[in-house]
Amino acid sequence: MKLIEIAQRLGLKVEAGVDHLENEVRGGYAGDLLSCVMARAKTGDLWVTVQRHPNIVAVAVLVGLAGIVVTEGGNIEPATLERAEQEGIPILVSSASAFRVVGELWDLGIRGE
Amino acid sequence: MRSRGAGTRTQLTKLEELLRELRVEEVMTRRLVSVSGDFTMAQVKELLRKHRISGVPVLEGEALVGVVSIEDVTRALEQGEMGAKVRDRMSREVITVFADEPAVEAVKRFAHTKVGRLPVLDRGGKVVGILTPGDPVGRAFRVMDLRYREQEQQRWQQKGLGLEDLLGEGASLVLRFRVQGEDFAGAGKASVQAKRVLGRLGLDPGAVRRATIAAYEAEMNLIIHTRGGELTLEATPHSVVVEAVDKGPGIVDVEQALQPGFSTAPEWVCEMGFGAGMGLNNIQSCADEFEIESEVGRGTRVRAVVHLSQSGRKDRLNR
Ligand SMILES: Nc1ncnc2c1ncn2[C@@H]1O[C@H](COP(=O)(O)OP(=O)(O)OP(=O)(O)O)[C@@H](O)[C@H]1O
Ligand SMILES: [Mg+2]
């Protein structure tokens, strides 16, 4: 499923990377410990996290993620968004908790291990 | 001499093939300058000069009714008839070519008729472009050149690492980054940069992924646990070697540091999601060879080697 469809269905706010919403989402991973994301997320996964500092963009690039969903709303640091734009990583924001976002993704057929 | 003759011959055959393959519409000029029969020859002269062309089609509405060329203008000039209408001075016998015909047909028409331009028509009879004698062959050569370059690039990519061809056997490419301690703003930049460079070299993406994830963990350890150090990635035709070196504080118990979950990261760093105690383990699982050396007060050196798959070996983490 394309990221743009997920963004629409879940009502996510696109904060960065509008030009990359055609990215195909192959699966999902949720978690806030960066080394665990590095170890377990797969290429093409959508990553659900509360982290919002610039380093999440580096993680997304290196793992080859389709995008990042930042949960629990609020503002994202401008430095994070700037870096996401530079690297072409979509950042989508939800005001819901990770629990809820993951549940909705699962309902759409997005799976993870 | 002999080999050169053969080379020219194969080029000619390729050119012929290409002229058969390309359609007229792929080699013609689309931006069409045209006049109506009401133009004066003086106006035509201006138009030809302005556009640096030697002739234009004459249209009445959408229909092609003739062609007027620089020769017609010259003749009108000699006869002092520059005020004459195009309609009375143009040639009405227009040789044309269809847009969907092979380009080679246009070449033949130029050879047999000696005209200086061929208006191009669609099957509805509408003028859609114009062709001059050099267009088909010139364009075909450009296409040949383009395809040659594409093939070159593909050959490079198929070979995997092109470094051997680029630098010669035994040479390697070294990327070296200074990493500042506690520089969370720049954190991960070196590894991301390295990924971009290695990717562009056409290396196996799975191997690049593993090498740069290892580099990232080493880079983060320099930032979190040291006052800074140096991160290098060395690409050879067979491997990528990642190395991180710092001058302290060093690790008290390396065995313990390698345990999954062991971490001395301070609380404020953990809040950012670091300090899972998984970094060194990640480096190990990404690497085909792994070494760590540390001495308290002197520093730490981490080295990880990722082999490049030569025979299409299924990459372990190429998931
Ligand atoms: N270059 C280094 N200098 C000093 N100590 C280090 C260095 N690298 C690692 N360590 C020590 O080894 C421990 C384990 O490192 P590791 O990278 O596995 O986990 P971490 O950095 O604590 O957390 P994570 O990498 O999961 O964010 C660290 O907490 C730290 O005590
Ligand atoms: Mg670490």
Image (spheres, rainbow, N blue to C red):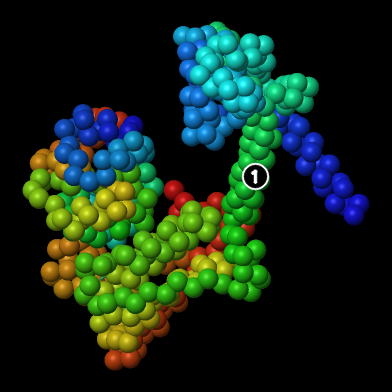
Image point 85% across, 51% down: which residue? Answer: B4
Tell me where residue B274 appears, x and y as whole percent. Answer: 22, 65
> In what element is the residue under mark 1?
helix
| Res. B150 image quadrant | top right
Q: Is residue A98 visible?
A: no
Q: Which residue is mark 1?
A: B145
Amino acid type of disc 1?
Answer: Asp
| Res. A104 image quadrant | top left
**In this orientation, which residue lies closer to the viewer: A51 or B250?**
A51
Tell me where residue A5 appears, x and y as whole percent. Answer: 27, 30
**In this orientation, which residue lies closer to the viewer: B235 or B213?**
B235
Tell me where residue A69 appears, x and y as whole percent. Answer: 21, 44
Relative placement, left or right, of B91 versus A72 is right
Picture quarter with the N terminus of chain B: bottom right
Position of A11 relative to B67 (above/below): below
Q: Is residue B159 visible?
A: yes
